[in-house]
Amino acid sequence: MLVELDIQLVPTGEIVNIEITYRDSSATDAFVASVDKAVKKVGHFDKLSLLDPVLFDANFRKFTLKFKPEDLRL
């Protein structure tokens, strides 16, 4: 299973938008909902507020996260 998300942040590190851009055919609705919920639960990334604004805009304003369950550590 694979789900790709585009995540948008503001300079404080707060997540302001999550968009599901791709899901493979084996990704169930429950899995996609779980991925979305996990990212929303994070809410913000504290350390990003310490970055130089130019560096933040270039690398963290919007990024793609590829989520595969086999990447998880138990």
Image (tube, rainbow, N blue to C red):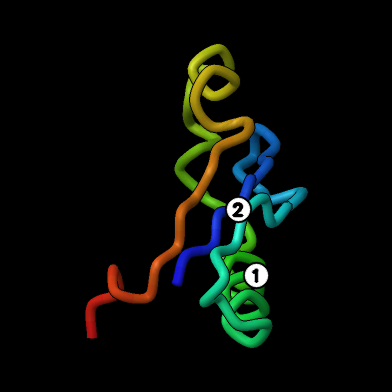
User: What is the x, y in percent for residue 7?
Assistant: 64, 46
Question: Which is nearer the eye, 55 or 67?
Answer: 67
Residue at the far top: name it.
Answer: 54
Q: Can you say whether 55 is above or below 60 in the image?
A: above
Left or right of 40: which side holds 47? left
Q: Answer with mark 2 or mark 1, whichever residue precedes in sequence.
A: 2
Question: Which is nearer the eye, 19 or 62?
Answer: 19
User: What is the x, y in percent for residue 54?
Assistant: 55, 12
Three-letter amino acid code at the position of disc 2 = Leu
**Labels 2 and 1 touching (C-beta < 8 A):** yes
Residue at 53% over, 17% down: 58
SS category of the residue bearing label 2: strand
Q: Residues within 10 Å of mark 2 (few under 14, many from 20)?
A: many
Residue at 60% over, 20% down: 57
Q: Quadrant of the rendered structure where residue 34 is?
A: bottom right
Task: Tell me, for residue 5, which label it has, or none.
Answer: 2
Q: Residues within 10 Å of mark 1 (few under 14, many from 20)?
A: some
User: What is the x, y in percent for residue 1?
Assistant: 45, 72
Task: Tell me, for residue 68, which label it has, or none.
Answer: none
Left or right of 28: which side holds 68? left
Residue at 23% over, 86% down: 74
Question: Which is nearer the eye, 37 or 46?
Answer: 37
Three-letter amino acid code at the position of disc 1 = Asp
Q: Quadrant of the rendered structure where residue 32 is?
A: bottom right
What is the distance, in whole Å, between disc 2 and disc 1 at their CAs? 8 Å
Q: Can you say whether 22 is above or below 12 in the image?
A: below
Identify the residue under disc 1.
36
User: What is the x, y in percent for residue 12?
Assistant: 64, 39
